[in-house]
Image: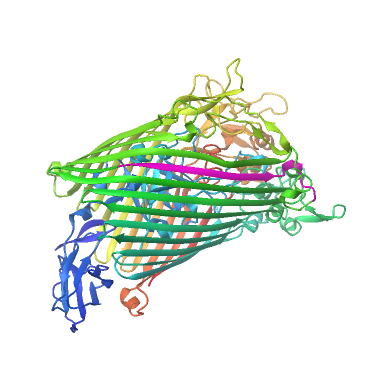
Amino acid sequence: MGLFFLEGGNCYASEQQVLRGTIEVPSDHNTVRGRVIDIYGEPLIGATIREKGGANGTVTDIDGKFFLSVPDSAVLQVSFVGYKTVEVNVTGRNVLEIRLQEDAVMLEHVIVTALGLEKDEATLAYSVQKIKGEELNRVKEVNMIAALAGKAAGVQINKNSSGMGGSAKVSLRGIRSVSGDNQPLYVIDGVPMSNTSSEQAYSAIGGTANAGNRDGGDGISNLNPEDVESISILKGAPAAALYGSMAANGVILITTKKGNSAGQRNINFSTGLTFEKAFSMPKMQNRYGVSDVVDSWGEKENLMAYDNLNDFFRTGLTSMTSVSISYGNENLQTYFSYANTTGKGIIDKNKLRKHNINLRETATMFDKRLKLDGSVNVMKQTVENKPVSGGFYMNPLVGLYRFPRGEDLSYYKDHFETYDEERKLGVQNWHTFTEDFEQNPYWITNRIQSKETRTRVILSLSANFKVNDWLTIQARGNMDYWADKLRQKFYASTATALCGANGRYVEMDYQETQMYGDVMAMVKKTWGDFTLDAAIGGSINDKVVNSTRYDSKNASLKFANVFNIANIVMNSSASIDQRIDQRRQLQSIFGTAQIGYKEKLFLDLTARNDWASTLSYTSHEKSGFAYPSVGLSMLLDKWVKLPEWISFAKLRGAYSKVGNDIPPFITNPSSQINAGGEIQANDAAPFKEMEPEMTHAIEFGTEWRFFQHRLGVNLTYYRTNTYNQFFKLPALAGDKYAYRYVNAGNIQNRGWELTLNGTPVLTPDFNWKTSVNFSTNKNKIVKLHEDLKEMIYGPTSFSSSYAMKLIKGGSIGDIYGKAFVCDDAGNIVYETEGDNKGLPLVEGDGNTVKVGNANPVFMMGWDHTFSYKGFTLYFLLDWRYGGEVLSQTQAEMDLYGVSEITADARDRGYVMLDGQRIDNVKGFYKIVGGRAGVTEYYMYDATNLRLREVSLSYNFSKKWIQKTKVLKDVQLSFVARNLCFLYKKAPFDPDLVLSTGNDNQGIEVFGMPTTRSLGFTLKCEF
């Protein structure tokens, strides 16, 4: 007999024996007993039985059975996801057998789209991918968005290499904007949230004001993943057009949990403990010892193999515990949760503590015509001694990796400082100079101390009033406030060229308040064969930033190691940066309409007009900018009779135009006052004709499902062209200012996305589900400004063989540097005389040679879920193919002779380069190695295939659990993340990034190593 199983919202076919008969139990006039089954007689586990108009309710057990005490006159409402709800009169009956019929709607997914509007996924004209909250919680990450890596086509996620509490770089369908951050807009329950990062890496050398590169974190990492019900990813501009300029880079919609309406109290508890171990670390040699005090180009000898690296990195530990309570009835629902995250990083003294509290109340009134929804989300996070994300300044890995081989680093661990009798304080102890780049790694972990705290509060309220059967009015308001505080102490004798003799002190406060409100009128109407699903409304988004950063820099401190603002020597060598009520506002009106014909053909139309405060003083200040979109979807299976094995078929296409916000204070810039009263004059002319970036996007796709939805295919082609890029150019002759701003350029992205999902095996005891997502994106700089031959990201005033440049015909992500000189035949040219005879010639001073591009050719994720009775095995393979990355860490290690590759060359007596034997091994690495060496030589293929996630779970038998009369469900899991690389050529993890901004991509400079996580989780339901 054919049977449908409900798995993950889909309906699947299987073979099963029909169960017949009625369960007979002793009767009681106040107690109703029975079971809920489907049309084939199979029990429905977890079906809801609720007394209509009352608070009583229950759910069925593993056998579909239930019992409930109700009055004899009661009416029971019985419901189950994917089945039609029925009402049953109890009068005169004590034993019931209730059969539920499948609801045809269950084969059509309801998905949350822009502005929080729910729509039937089958009707959409654009690509949307829905991901369940369990994907975030199966193998948890401190930053929950990182758990989506490898799980969605067209979504690239890179973690910042700063460790716990770090931010993530998320890009949907490539990089579009030259000046924007290219991050998607995050929306919680229909309302935009802030995802600002207060600071990112400044350069490959060091951070802001020559401090260490700091990752200021992001907003999405503040959320508790246990509160997430589902995520909808709107990857293309057509899907996100309703959000206007905020959503030029796509939208990630987060739907959070709310209280149940079954009249029950559900308590969920989860706790997990994972251990992190650094792996994929540099390969060191142990055969050639110290020479010239600082490097390891000495004679070959039998060295003591000190394991300095593993002794420095400890085993990290992360604990995540969450408890939630869900309660309610059909009129009032409550959801409350608390989560605690604590951890210690792989570097000593690095700690994290995070607390999340969430309360959500939903209510219906006036015969369900008025719906109220309010929530309060509070987060407090503290991170101590967060490592730098990379670079040379204030980085313990520089001294750790350069340290001469055969020497015992433990001496400098125990004696990282010595007492200076003259100064009456401890000073840094190291085997070489410590003015800037290199310092004792244990001095850094003990005497460069930082503490970052973040407090965040998100308040939301919405009211939804049903005027009549076809008109609904909705109003929403939201406040998103967060405050960061950083205090960083550099003790005296820390990098004296960067800190001053008495030390350095940095204190920063950053507060951001975002207020959002919108009002919408929503219409749902049917006229014969036609349907209309429309909304019209307006919104306002107001953001205010206040920040202050004090930094003593080289001005030093008045008294050594006294860390407060009053002790800063406040002259022009110090730094003060302050923003007072920096405000930007976006006012908008919008409308959307979906017109359906016979539930077969759907036309989607959207329009939005934005008025941005950043366009003040321009000719567009009053008119704003309009963003339209149009899409069409056709359900082939409803137009044409297809074979029975084809369950669903759809064609879709869409076009849109959407803008991107621009930086503030460009249209009317002003001068600034620096520390000590120095005036920094504005150097750029006001840009009165500025326009926002504008993205024109098209996409076409098709979706098919086969064999009663057990096999699904989703294919999409897209192309985006982003015009009016924002550039700062040198002024024309005779101009009053040194620079001018212009709108110009055309950045194109085009690619394919493919998602396959299937259930090859589905039986009552054993299930196998699998899905594959594949995406490819090609970025091209079609045009820049006619006066701009190239644009260089980041500073250029330091010695480094790395630069990111934009050049017409190239791509965002192109890396430029130095390369070997080649003749017309492509052969490397060598020096023929002098000290460098036989060594290769090098060109590209000023980083003029293109050596690679950091972007992957394609990405693919492949997951499998095997379920047998109570056991479930899940694993995810994540494959990134193509792209090149630069390792300046390897270049530095080769220069200093500490790497295994230099020892192998010395053992052989030569280096092979492009078929040419080079006998001067040390001379070769002195030319190519180091941060200013030959970029081309240290470019690596970024291709990697990894076992991204593994989870082995066991759900204890419900029959056993129910005997406790307390527990409803218990699951114990072994979890692992980044278990191993199945293929990798780069000497580091190419997925880790120095910065989540546009610059500093495709380069690794003493970044923290990636970690392998192993642990256990326990989940209980009461």
- Residue located at (27% from left, 67% from top): 765
Total marks placed: 0
In percent of width and height, residue 30 lies at 21, 81
Can residue 507 be seen here? yes
| Prevailing secondary structure of the magenta residues | strand
In percent of width and height, residue 754 lies at 32, 42
- Does residue 952 show up magenta in the picture? no
Q: Quadrant of residue 685?
A: top right
Highlighted range, magenta: 536-559
In-image side of 594 versus 294 (left or right): left
- Depth check: give the residue in front, 534 or 449: 534
In percent of width and height, residue 329 lies at 30, 67
Can residue 913 be seen here? no
In-image side of 245 versus 594 (left or right): right
- Does residue 542 show up magenta in the picture? yes
In percent of width and height, residue 29 lies at 18, 83
Of all residues shown, which one is farthest toward the top? Answer: 734
Q: Quadrant of the C terminus?
A: bottom left
- Depth check: give the residue in front, 800 or 454: 454
- Depth check: give the residue in front, 451 or 753: 451
Q: Quadrant of the N terminus?
A: bottom left
- Residue located at (52% from left, 54% from top): 456
Say how the picture is coloured: rainbow
